[in-house]
Image (cartoon, rainbow, N blue to C red):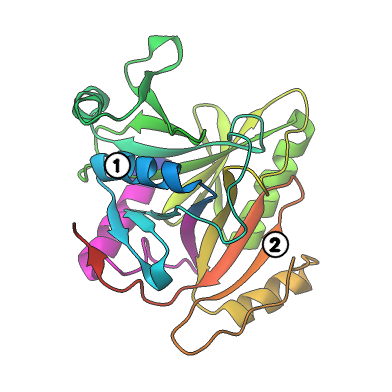
Amino acid sequence: MKPGNFIALLLVSALAAGSAAAQPAPFNATGVTFGHWHLASTPANVEANKKIFFAMGGRLFMPGGAPVMMFPGTYINLTLNSGPGSGETVGSVVNRVGFAVPNIQAAVAKWKAAGVPVLPGDNNRMDQAFVVTPDGLRIEILEDKAQTMPIRSDQVHLFLTEAEIPKAEAWYAKTFGGIANTRANEPVVDVPGSQIRFAKVPTAQAPTKGRILDHIGFDVNDLPAFVRKIEAEGIKLDQPLRTPNPGANNITYITDPWGTRIELIQRAPLGPEVTN
């Protein structure tokens, strides 16, 4: 089974099993599923991004008053308490994130009609497109003709030097219980809900913290147990594990060896969907 089809199958199972507020994809044997992209947008760009993500098929929730868009396989947090970030994703270690759709040309036509800023694929590829938000989040759109849902989370694409790619592949597979694979002749690690991809660049890229995509996140079904696991593997927390009030998110952060800030979250319910 192709990696993308494997991810889509997990997502179909998850959506059939639960409500829109359930986890985006089932937890794997390590107790992990892909969680979110966390943007640090200005108020004006939050509103612009809402329009873009609504047009692309996202659903809005407001847990704790903060806007969160939900797509199959990922949440997108639109604001960060520390304030807006500076610096687009290009130039950072997470160069882009991505969605898959069953028909690129149909999706592009629909999105353009709704005002979504869509760019053509590399070398005018017909099975690829890009959406770049006003604050510089680069989203790759790829085609999966076997996909039955209109859109789903597809990837987080790390840009690393050649010598670091095998180390990163091994780190993500071990840390999150992912499955090492290849896609388009590039190494990848499959996790429920998304895929971590690795591309070669000549020089190390900037860390994500403080940029428009400040961090990515993984949902964990038992965060204290997961923290014990990764600390035993030598991974240090960026901050102590937060013990929240009942019903709140349980979170901490780590940073991978290449500068990707990662939130680990045992997620509380999102609450009702905002439909207006």
Q: Residue furthest bottom?
A: 246
Closest to the observer: 6 or 275?
Answer: 275
* Residue 51 position by quadrant: top left
- Mark 1–mark 2 CB contact (< 8 Å): no
The residue tagged 2 is 254
Q: Which amino acid type is shown beneath numbered disc 2?
A: Ile
Q: Is residue 11 magenta?
A: yes
Say which mark, if any, is on residue 89: none
Q: Quadrant of the N terminus?
A: top left
Is residue 228 located in the magenta-colored stretch of the structure?
A: no
Give how far across and how far down residue 168 sits, in percent.
70, 45
Q: Which residues are magenta?
A: 7-36
- Taking the spot 81% from the left edge, 66% from the top edge, the residue there is 234
Q: Residue at x 23, y 69 (%)?
A: 19
Q: Quadrant of residue 107?
A: top left
The answer to whether any part of residue 31 appears in the image is no
Residue in the image at 70% along x and 78% along y: 228
What quarter of the picture does the C terminus occupy? Answer: bottom left
In the displayed structure, does residue 148 sit left or right of residue 174?
left
- Residue 130: x and y, percent? 41, 26
Q: Is 189 rendered above or below residue 22?
A: above
Is the residue 175 above or below the residue 8 in the image?
below
Q: Residues within 10 Å of mark 2 (few under 14, many from 20)?
A: some
The 10 Å Cα crowd at callout 1, few under 14, some 14 to 19, many 20 or more, is some
Q: Amino acid at mark 1?
A: Lys
Left or right: residue 3 compared with residue 163: left
SS under mark 1: helix
Query: On the image, numbered disc 1 is attached to which residue?
Result: 51
Tell me the distance, in whole angstroms, between the alpha carbons under discs 1 and 2: 31 Å
Q: Relative to 234, is 10 above or below?
A: above
Give residue 11's position: percent from left, percent from top: 31, 56
